[in-house]
Every structure is written in C-alpha cells, then in structure tokens.
Image (cartoon, helix red, strand yellow):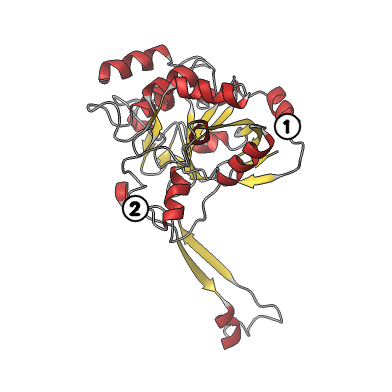
Amino acid sequence: MDINTVLQKSAEYRNWGKWGPDDELGSMNFVTQEMVIAASALVRKGKVFSLALPLDADGPMNGSFGRINPVHVMLQDGGDIASGAQDHIATLRYTDDAAYLVLQSSTQWDALAHIYHDGQMYNGYGTDQVNSHGALKNSITNIKDRAVGRGVLLDIARYKGKAALATSEPIEAADLEGCAAQQGVTVGEGDFVLVRTGQLEERRLAGEWGDFAGGPAPGLAISASDFFCPRHVAAVSTDTWGTEVLPNETADVFQPLHIIMLVNAGIHLGEMWDMEELAKDCADDGVYEFMLVAPPLTVTGSVGSPVNPQAIK
C-alpha cells in the first residue's frame, strides 16, 4: 500500500463539515444523552476496572519522540514534619507533592489536534491553530464531558488463541468482524471500542518495556478503518504504544491510520490502555460490553491527555 490508499480512504471517511465548520468534537458527536443512559444500564455487577498504567518512573517511555516517564517529587514529606520545618503551623502538619508529566507518556487520549496531514488537522484547521500556548482548536479538553458511553472490548489476542499477537501482526477489518461475532457483541454508532493485542501484558511479564514505545508492534491495519468508520464509533483504544501495526503498511506514510481516522474521520484514539483484568472478566462471564467513563484532564490547550479509564460492568 502507498499514499494513494491513505488518500482514498481519507476522502471516503472524511467528516469535515458534517457537524458544521466550527466542530471540534468529531465522532464524539455520535454519543447522545440517550446512549449514555443506555450505557448506564450495562452496569449489572458493580465491578469497576481501571485501565490505566501507573504514572511513575517505571513506565514505557524511553525518550523517543521527546517523551519521558513521569517525574514525581515530594514538596513536603514526613522528614519535614519530623525536623520541625512545619512547627510554625499551629498543630496541623502536611505532606505535598508535584509531578512533571508528558501528557502522552502513559495511558492517554490523542486529541484531534495531535495529528496533521498536509498542514491540516480535523475539520480543516491549519497549523496556526496550535501554537506555543497550546491548541486553539481541537484540544482534548473538548471531550471533558463527552468521553462516557458504551464500551466494547474486542479481545483479538484471545480470538486468535494467543496470549499476545506476534510482533508486527496486523489486525485487519476481517479480524475485528470475526472477533465481534465470536464474542457475540455488536459494534455500532457512538461506541468506545477497546482492542486488545496482549502486547502490553507480554512486556510487563517480561519485566522490561524494551522498544514498546515506538518499536515494532502488532496493531490495527489500514483496513481496520473499513470496520470502524462506517460504524460511526466514537473512539478506538488499544493496549499498544501507537494503535497501528508497526512497521506501518505504507513505507511512504508514517501512521497512516492516524491520518484516516483521527485527522479525517475525527475518531479519537486511545493508547497504552491496560485491558488485562477487564479482558479476564469478559472471558469469564462472556459479556464484552460495559459502561466506559474516561474523561481527559482539563489542561487548557492540550493536544493529548493522561486518563484513568473506568470500565464498569
């Protein structure tokens, strides 16, 4: 495949102008209040699964693309209390901390402002709309009250009878369709779809991340857009660093699916979501749908955000 395939699918699935010239929500527009009410009815057991990796120095970042793991520092700790440094305060003593956090260093959302192609991001906004102060259009903060709805897990690794997909194994549209059929679950408009490859757990069990961040990886093939885009899903998340199969299928385009789905279809992408406990529970009870609550942090103008997604069954 080459750039022509990417351009064809980008044009076919483009949602620019669908919700007006000023839209910044993309496919999150498909999530209605009625859908949120319906999603709440999926809570039957009261079980809650956090899908977030820890935010600490042991995360998967290796410095590639300028991303490092979170740096957590204590501003006041027990030593300050014991040393008398807080004795000027009447009776009460306290601890305090801070973090330096690359917003896409762990479990996260990609904003619609995160990716450009030919000088344009989703809905045709230009490069002038992201400056040194942040995104003026398509910031992730636009979905601060939108990232709630019906979640669906497509456990591709289990579907293929593997603990984890092989390195650089692509997930085609046919794989997604077959997995959904085997699990007895439908994927439709406004859904938040979680795709499990098993790579995250494989690296965790190995005791080292290695080249998880940016290296060869299983992931979604370009044809996955033929599954997600016509179904009008709200968002797609994976347990990999970059959503797509790496190396990409296109030597002349880096991350082609980001261009098709994020830039043109306006489908938000989530990366490095930890689906292991949720996947075990889904396999045990045969229920692969749940309520998903995954709002981003409200960092003004941010083009991505850490998230602690909650799958509730």
Which amino acid, by three-letter code, is at mark 1?
Leu
Relative to residue 254, is residue 98 drawn left or right?
right
Secondary element at tag 2: loop
Which amino acid, by three-letter code, is at mark 2?
Gly
Q: Earlier in the sequence, mark 2 or mark 1?
A: 1
| Residue 43, position as x, y percentages in the image | 74, 36
Q: Residue furthest front?
A: 161
Residue sitting at x 65%, y 41%: 281
Nearest the eye: 60 or 235? 60
| Residue 2, position as x, y percentages in the image | 25, 20
Residue sitting at x 59%, y 38%: 144
Label 1 neighbourhood size at 10 Å, few (<14), some (14-19), many (20+)? some
| Residue 284, position as x, y percentages in the image | 66, 39
Label 2 neighbourhood size at 10 Å, few (<14), some (14-19), many (20+)? few
**Cα distance, mark 2 to mark 1?**
38 Å
Q: Residue furthest left?
A: 252
Nearest the eye: 283 or 91? 283
Q: Residue furthest bottom?
A: 83
In the image, residue 305 sits, relative to residue 1, either above or below, namely below
Q: Quadrant of the N terminus?
A: top left
| Residue 40, position as x, y percentages in the image | 73, 32
Which residue position is annotated with label 1?
42
The answer to which image quadrant residue 124 occupies is top left
Relative to residue 270, is residue 246 drawn left or right?
left
Which residue position is annotated with label 2?
210
